[in-house]
Image (cartoon, rainbow, N blue to C red):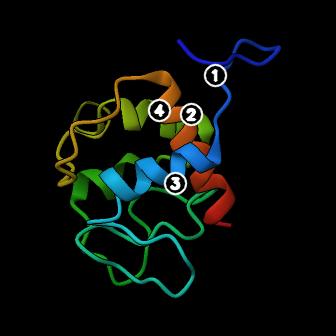
Amino acid sequence: MGKKDKKGAVSGDAAKGAKIFKQKCAQCHTYNADGGNKTGPLLFGLFGRKSGSVGGYDYTAANKDKGVLWNEETLDIYLTNPKKYIPGTKMIFAGLKKPQERADLIAFLKKETS
């Protein structure tokens, strides 16, 4: 299932997460401070930010109204099945079903978006 830490959570590998980002996320998102919005919103500053709050991005009402505070836990749930977590989102990504892939991607995003 994946490497677990002492608390039972799956630990991520940012290098593997970079590959996942490139394959599954980079078409629609950027993550560096000067990246800007694409089809999806800029991910820089993601951790600790509320859903639907990136300036200049046209979010659905569902995304704005969800009021999620993004952290490792909420991202793990969201990345499993975005349309289930935020019904009405325009994100067309089906999700990452493997816990290790989600942990790797989250480790990458945590490292690169702060």
Q: Residue 38 carries which label?
A: none
Q: Which of 109/3 is in front?
A: 3
Answer with the quarter of the image where residue 38 lies.
Answer: bottom left
Q: Residues within 10 Å of mark 2 (few under 14, many from 20)?
A: many
Residue at image location 36% in from the left, 29% down from the top: 80
Left or right of 103 on screen, residue 24: left
Question: Which residue does the numbered mark 1 point to in the structure image?
Answer: 10
Give, as a three-letter code, the residue at label 4. Glu
- Front position in the image: 107 or 62: 107
Instruction: Out of 98 and 69, give the one closest to the viewer.
Output: 98
* Proximity of marks 2 and 1: CB atoms separated by less than 8 Å: yes
State which tag comes first along the sequence, 3 or 4.
3
Tell me, yes or no, whether the two marked residues, 2 and 3, touch with CB atoms within 8 Å.
no
Residue pictured at 58% horizontal, 17% vertical: 2
Q: How far apart are marks 4 and 2 (CA)?
A: 5 Å
Residue linked to disc 3:
18
Q: Mark 2 highlights which residue? A: 103
Residue that numbered label 4 is attached to: 101
- Which secondary structure lies at badge 4? helix
Q: What residue type is labelled 1?
A: Val
Tell me what residue is drawn at x 48 percent, y 46 percent: 68
Q: How far apart are marks 1 and 4 (CA)?
A: 10 Å
Return the disc, 1 or 4, that comes first in the chain's sequence.
Answer: 1
Task: Determine contact: label 1, label 4, CB under 8 Å.
Answer: no
Which quadrant of the structure image shows residue 26?
bottom left
Question: Mark 2 and mark 3: span between their CA atoms?
Answer: 11 Å
Crowd tier of the residue under label 4, counting other residues whose Cα lies within 10 Å: few below 14, some 14–19, many 20 or above: many
Mark in front: 2 vs 3? 3
- In which quadrant of the rendered image does the C terminus lie? bottom right
